[in-house]
Amino acid sequence: MFHWLEKNPFFFAVAVFLTISFAGLIEILPNFAQASSPTVGTKPYSTLELTGRHVYIKNSCNACHSQLVRPFKSETDRYGNYSLSGEYAYDRPFLWGSKRTGPDLHRVGNYRTTDWHENHMWNPAEVVPGSIMPAYRWMFVNEADVDTAYAEQVTINNVFNVPYNKPVPMKDGSTETVVLADTLEGAHAAALAEAKIIAADMKNQDVKDAIASGKIPEIVALIAYMNRLK
Amino acid sequence: MNKLVLWGILITAAMLGFTYMAVGGSKGGLNNDIINILTIAAAVVLVIVTVFVVIKYVRQMQTDTATGELADENWDGIGEYKNELPMGWAILFLILNIWAIWYMLMGYPVNAYSQIGEYNEDTKAHNAKFEAKYASITGDALVDMGESVFLAECKVCHGLTADGIDGKAANLNQRLEEKSVKHVVENGSNFLGFPAPMPDRNGLFNMNTGALITDAEIAAVSQYVANGMKGEGAEIFTGTCAACHGADGKGMEMVAPNIATFDIATVKAVLDHGKKGAIGVMPSFDRLNEKQKEAVGAYISSISK
């Protein structure tokens, strides 16, 4: 067989290619599979969180804020542990960002709270002197688009097998289940229930009124998403 | 003596001559320095050995003819002999094999570069340096460290001057605001990790009257505590709060926090556990190390009245 290969340069080249490709694959694939599978503690987005993620994308937050903590002491001091690829398992699309005009937000849920976000989104410069971030007051008025978020949930559940309604392992050894509603009405009800908990920590009267009448302002969805980034 | 050996001797002489001119002729010469002497001796030996080894192989090329049994294969007229494996080559090959196994199992996995590995080393070195430098920091230096930590981590909510930015966070220039005291008395609290939680108003008795604390009493005692333990309401405090918080409000270890003034232990407890009170939620700050938490405590104690 090798004599034959040695006399046929083309097939020799093919054989070399196959051998090296195989060696490369068995080196790369297991690591890649391990690194890209969800880390323990990473769970799919709930309906309200995903709605907030759409608000984040719609307002191009990712143009100024990254979501990727690099493994440098200076970064982990400021933002918490460096990011792992498995933490982005349910991010479609990922929102790593490419420029930090503002700070990184990958773990903002660990050190900012609902009431802080409320004050900050209403008037950033008041909370952070010298901040150049614009105010996002329309988020307190605009109604969040739960329908699109639910459609996305159903899609990724069916197409990518994202584990909705299945127990997901958490860091403390317990499991959590993110519920995907059966119907659109159910999704609205679940999102509203989640929004009520967040709005209870907020002070803006318009937001409270909207929640009381069964509507979800964009700011509540966005805060749900921010609080989940840990 | 043939021409080749003659050439060899000539070249040896010339190279030794250059060596002498470079070393022996320089200022100070060998200087009786053992390293200099050894170096020059090695140079002389190298020159002689090199020249005569080269002579051997040049002569071999001139006179040798190929002998041995040819292998069956030949490639466009180029054949090869069935020679024994040279011993030196075989030994080197074995050593290379052993090295390859070591490198695959030990060398690469243990010593390979990784970004995370470098990060871990950086962090370890930094922490060790921090520990060494600030192990016994006290007094003004500790307060200064606390101020810089405060400006990096706390000012975002509490403001540059720790005034809480118009009620968006706790004003740290005073221990407690009236509404915060009121909120805790009415709702109870278990945020600072003490073994027993503080009960809500349905568990707070005024020992002077022997009844549950009333709205009027809550208002009075809140004002009293927020005022820095001054004014009216002292007897309500003694009857209701002093059992856990102490007669002077300075708290008791493992029982209740200091509510008269800020101290390092109280601030540390808040940083460790976070807080949810009348104003809102404060997250815990696990990423500060113990010394930094202590420093923040010292700084807040120093600015609060």
Image (tube, grey):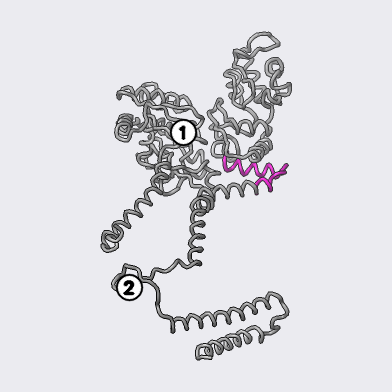
- Of residues B214 and A145, the one nearer the viewer is A145
Q: Which residues are the magenta region? A: B129-154
In the figure, B206 relative to A214: above or below? Answer: above
Task: Please report the residue visible at 63 percent of the width from the left and 27 percent of the height from the top.
Answer: B176
How far across and down, in percent of the image, does residue B96 sit? 49, 60
Image quarter where the N terminus of chain A lies is bottom left
Residue A179: quarter of image: top left
In the figure, B295 relative to A146: above or below? Answer: below
- Of residues B87 and A97, the one nearer the viewer is B87
Q: Residues within 10 Å of mark 1 (few under 14, many from 20)?
A: some
**Left or right: A217 in relation to B177:** left
How far across and down, in percent of the image, does residue A187 sit? 34, 25
Q: Are marks 1 and 2 on the same chain?
A: no
Residue A147 magenta-highlighted: no
Disc number placed over residue A41 in the picture, else none:
1
- Of residues B221 and A167, the one nearer the viewer is A167
In the figure, B7 relative to B239: above or below? Answer: below
Q: Which residue is mark 2?
A: B78
Question: Furthest-top residue in view?
Answer: B210
Residue B9 visible in image? yes
Residue B141: quarter of image: top right
Disc number placed over residue B229 in the picture, else none:
none
